[in-house]
Structure formats: structure tokens, C-alpha cells
Amino acid sequence: MIPEDKKKPGWTYGHSEVLNQDFAFRKDYLGNLELYTEDKTHYTWDEIEIINEQGTIPLEVHLLKKAFKGKIVKDKSKKPADK
């Protein structure tokens, strides 16, 4: 966990078991949520919403995002399942 003397005001801190690292999040100046992981990977509000829809972020997705400095997006080619 991040030591108390390293924590910055306005940020909320936690730990991801899946990623095996700490993270910090806050609302930016526009009121949107942003998140940084311990390995300095930045997640935007849109990415966080996609992750929340899935319930968690797979480690592989995080590693790809970090390696390519990419952005998580929805697959718009998928069609809803027939009922």
C-alpha cells in the first residue's frame, strides 16, 4: 500500500488484486473520474465505465494498454445477442 506520507490530497487510494498493484483515483477539474495505477498507467472516465461494465479489468488488457499507451474502447462491431 502507498505510505501515508506519499498520498496526495483529493485522491482516493486502493489496491487491485488482479493487477497486484496500488491505484489512486480522483475527479478531474471537469468532474470526470481519472485513475492512475502504481505503474503509472492512466485510465480515463470512458475507460473506467467500460471496465465497470465488465466488472474488472483483465491483467492482459492492462498490460497491453500500458505497453502500447493505448485506450480501452468498446467493440462496436458486436451486435446484441438475440433473445
Image (cartoon, rainbow, N blue to C red):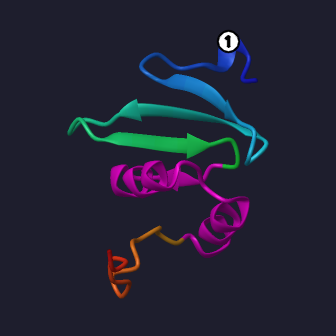
Magenta stretch: give its range.
Answer: 40-69
> What residue is at 64 percent from the left and 65 percent from the top?
66
View extreme (left): residue = 30
Q: Classify residue 21 as left or right of residue 75.
A: right
Judged by its main secondary structure, the magenta piece is: helix
Q: Residue 46, image x and y in percent?
A: 34, 56
Give the farthest residue toward the right.
20
Query: Residue drawn at (70%, 65%), measured in percent from left and top?
Result: 63
Could you say where residue 4 lies in the image, as x and y percent from the top left? 68, 11
Q: Is residue 49 left or right of residue 29?
A: right
Q: Is residue 65 above or below residue 16?
A: below
Residue 43 rendering spot, x and y as whole percentages: 48, 52
Given the current orientation, which residue lies at the most extreme front position?
Answer: 83
Q: Is residue 28 magenta?
A: no
Image-quadrant location for residue 58: bottom right
Q: Is residue 10 above or below residue 65?
A: above
Residue at 69 percent across and 41 percent down: it is 38
Question: What kind of element bears circle 1?
Answer: helix
Q: Quadrant of the N terminus?
A: top right
The residue sitting at the top extreme is 4
The number of discs equals 1
Q: Is residue 41 above or below residue 15?
A: below
Q: Quadrant of residue 26?
A: top left
Residue 13 % position (x, y)? 58, 24
Front-most of residues 59 and 24: 59
Residue 41: in magenta span: yes
The 10 Å Cα crowd at callout 1, few under 14, some 14 to 19, many 20 or more, is: few
Q: Residue at x 20, y 39 (%)?
A: 30
Q: Is residue 76 above or below residue 63?
A: below
Q: Disc 1 designates what residue?
A: 5
